Amino acid sequence: MVRTRLKLAVTLTVVVLALTGFQTGSHSGGGKSRSRGHSSHHDSGGGCSSDEKRNDDYGGSGSGTTAPTPTPSPASAEVVVVDCVKPETKKLKGKPARRADTTATLEITSKVWDTTTFRVTLEFKSASGSAVDSAETLVTVDGRAKKRFEIAMKKPKTVGQVRNCWVYDVRVER
């Protein structure tokens, strides 16, 4: 009897999570990260949905910590990390010393027709995948255009702990 109730409880939990659109995602190292806005044709009601889902709508496999995926603005923009921060390097044989670079370069592509202001949140992650720092900025982009911009670390002294940059959230600023 207890076993049957447990099976029922697990089945109901899975069904509820599936119907509410619960998602988990993972992100693993590398210098590039990507966040996509989702199109506004998603069903906002309950029940079954016949929405088309791309493979990248769901978290993939890979090393790193799995965490809930933030919900982006509908069909708003795509943001890509072009260049992450870099720690200071000492002068070595044949290589010059380099000062620390505590700003990340990103590129945003607007998916809307009008000039829009977006709030972009970037996380600076350690080798273990935990957040070392985060920063956000407002970026105004002409309709259907691309724009490069920079985000500086709030805690630049932690740059030596950063292994990658991850676009955490992109929202339309109203």
Image (spheres, rainbow, N blue to C red):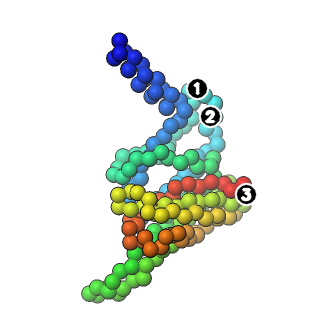
**Quadrant the N terminus occupies:** top left
Question: Label 1, on which residue?
Answer: 47
Q: Are marks 2 and 1 in contact (CB under 8 Å)?
A: yes
Mark 2 secondary-structure assignment: loop
Which residue occupies 39% across, 83% down? 98
- Pointer 1: residues within 10 angstroms few (<14), some, or many (20+)? few
Q: Earlier in the sequence, mark 3 or mark 1?
A: 1
Residue kind at label 1, given as amino acid type: Gly
Residue kind at label 2, given as amino acid type: Asp
Position of residue 44 relative to residue 120, above or below, is above
Locate residue 49, reporting x and y percent.
Answer: 57, 30
State the image quarter where residue 95 is shown: bottom left
* Residue at mark 3 to residue at mark 1: CA–CA distance: 33 Å
Locate residue 128, reporting x and y percent.
Answer: 35, 58
> Which circle, 3 or 1, is nearer the viewer?
1
> Which circle, 3 or 2, is nearer the viewer?
2
Question: Label 2, on which residue?
Answer: 43
* Residue at mark 3 to residue at mark 2: CA–CA distance: 24 Å
